[in-house]
Image (cartoon, rainbow, N blue to C red):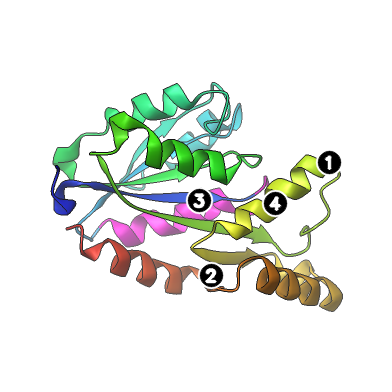
Amino acid sequence: MTPSSERIPVLIVAGFLGAGKTTFIRELIPRLIPGPRAPYVLLNDFLNAAIDAFTLKGLGAEIQGLAAGCVCCDDTGSLIDAILRVPVSIRPLIIIEANGTTDPYRLIETLTLTAALRDVLGSILQVTVINESRWGKRWLPGDKHTERAQVRTASAILTNRSETATHKQKQRLRDDLLELNPRAPRLDTDSFIDLLLHETAAET
């Protein structure tokens, strides 16, 4: 069995299109560069993967776009292959920017139950990024279910666009987060980075 110090920790960044996932990763990478783990980003956002990868170039992290399909169901093979190609020698922290409609349960199931990954991956954290003014406004029933599932499976919640949300929208979001996942802290970027560094410290 691979020692925990040699396993690769994973951060899943979940949230719908426009929530601010790429912006969060853009802020996160420079803060991780001086640390003991090298950020290695896997982007899964269909046609936007190549564009997002380009915008993140130059920040000091390895960036790879996965544009073939949703990694939770349509194209798990590409995700598994991409993870297995990550060089352990750089002591990576894999950051997966999931497609907005990714089912987090199926993604976590792939990461934890795939035989080829069992001896490779370490701790798995999920941060869900929410646009406060768009919460609960998805048109399709499936999207609404996914939006709530992304909260239920989160290790932490980050909210954006608070300046455009009404008091009623903010109150509804607070109530829903408390109902769906009362254990997940609602953090700002700096606080989440502190949490991430703490959680991965044992794997260095």
Residues marked 3 and 2 touching at CB (< 8 Å): no
**Which of disc 2 and disc 3 is earlier in sequence?**
3
In the rendered view of the protein, which quadrant contains the C terminus?
Answer: bottom left
- Amino acid type at mark 3: Val
**Which residues make up the magenta segment?**
16-33
Q: Position of residue 30 (x, y in %)?
A: 35, 57
Q: In this picture, is 41 found above or below 24?
A: above
Q: Secondary structure at mark 2?
A: loop
Q: Badge 4: few (under 14), some or many (20 or more) residues near its Cα, within 10 Å?
A: many
Q: Is residue 25 magenta?
A: yes
Q: Image point 28% across, 61% down: which residue?
A: 200
Q: Which residue is mark 4?
A: 147
Q: Image point 53% across, 32% down: which residue?
A: 49
Residue 57 visible somewhere in the drawing: no
Residues marked 1 and 2 touching at CB (< 8 Å): no
Q: Which residue is mark 2?
A: 184
Q: Spatial distance from mark 4 to mark 2, Cα to Cα?
A: 15 Å
The dot on residue 140 is: 1
